[in-house]
Amino acid sequence: MRLSRVTVLAVALVAGIIAAFLALKLTSAPPATQDASVETKVDTVQILVTTKDLPMGTTITSDAVQWQDWPRTAASGNFIVRAQQPDGITKVAGALARSTFYAGEPISEAKLIRTDRGFMSAILPKGERAVATKIAADTSAGGFILPNDRVDVIMTRQTPGAVGAGGTAGPPEFLTQTILHNVRVLAIDQTIEEKNGQKVVVGQTATLELKPQQAEILTVAQEMSSRLTLALRSIADGEKSGDPAGDAVDLLGGSRQGGITVVKNGVAREVGAIR
């Protein structure tokens, strides 16, 4: 009887020791962790990007561009891909920036100009003319007109006053007329001047994109006007007019001397400078 009890106690003791050992092992085992360093591999290609800001008209140099990894699915067909053009850096060197590039921006063929001619003639649309006119801050919307803005050109000229009954001329009269509508500003010649201790940018010359008829009108207006003013147009109504003769106006109401041909409502007519 005693032997059976001893056997049962021995078995229970061994079972308890085994259970305690297993429980201790389970509690001390480190928890299974997931590998957070596993990353999804992205398929990339090397494309040509800029290393710094390149303003419009800048000549691109080899140190201004570099190859950079880019997701293949995001690589546009306009980008310069190294696998397709391994000599891309050499090819873009010497080209002109048609518009501004920012640091890290992919080089796009559509934004490059490759020509041995001047930048202005390269960006000028076919059939258009670039004509410069003098401006000042008070004649150009306070100096806020910038390239690619659209403006109206307003002419102001002085005429002699009417002669009274006694033969005495009255005070001079000023006439104002909008001679060009909705024309694009190609460039503003800007110089840095100091005013009241502050550096400000003041344009001296505005270069406008004009049709041949508009160029003739502006040329006559520069000769006969007291001043020309540029009126800045809103972006909302700055769409280009489709009527090339819509801005042709009769600048003169008096006698003529010399003359050129301008167009009004599709009809050619001779105008000249006022005497």
Image (tube, rainbow, N blue to C red):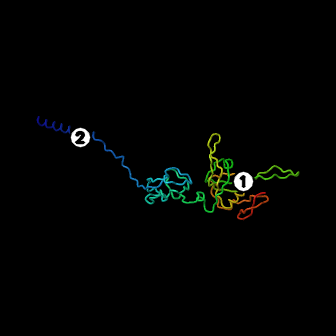
Question: Between 45 and 200, which is closer to the camera in this rendering?
Answer: 200
Quadrant for the C terminus, please.
Answer: bottom right
Q: Is residue 77 left or right of residue 230?
A: left
Question: Between 272 and 170, which is closer to the camera in this rendering?
Answer: 272
Q: Which residue is mark 1?
A: 155
Q: Position of residue 25 (x, y in %)?
A: 25, 40
Q: Position of residue 268 (x, y in %)?
A: 72, 65
Q: Residues within 10 Å of mark 2 (few under 14, many from 20)?
A: few
* Disc ID at residue 259: none
Q: Residues within 10 Å of mark 1 (few under 14, many from 20)?
A: many
Quadrant for the N terminus, please.
Answer: top left
Residue at 51% across, 50% down: 52
Q: Secondary structure at mark 2?
A: helix
Spatial CA distance of label 2 from label 1 is: 100 Å
* Amino acid type, callout 1: Met
State the residue lying farthest toward the top. Answer: 2
Q: Which residue is mark 2?
A: 22
Q: Position of residue 246 (x, y in %)?
A: 69, 60
Q: Is residue 113 left or right of residue 83?
A: right
Q: Nearer the viewer, mark 2 or mark 1?
A: 1
Above-or-below relation of 268 to 40 = below
* Amino acid type, callout 2: Leu
Q: Secondary structure at mark 1?
A: strand
Q: Position of residue 155 (x, y in %)?
A: 72, 53
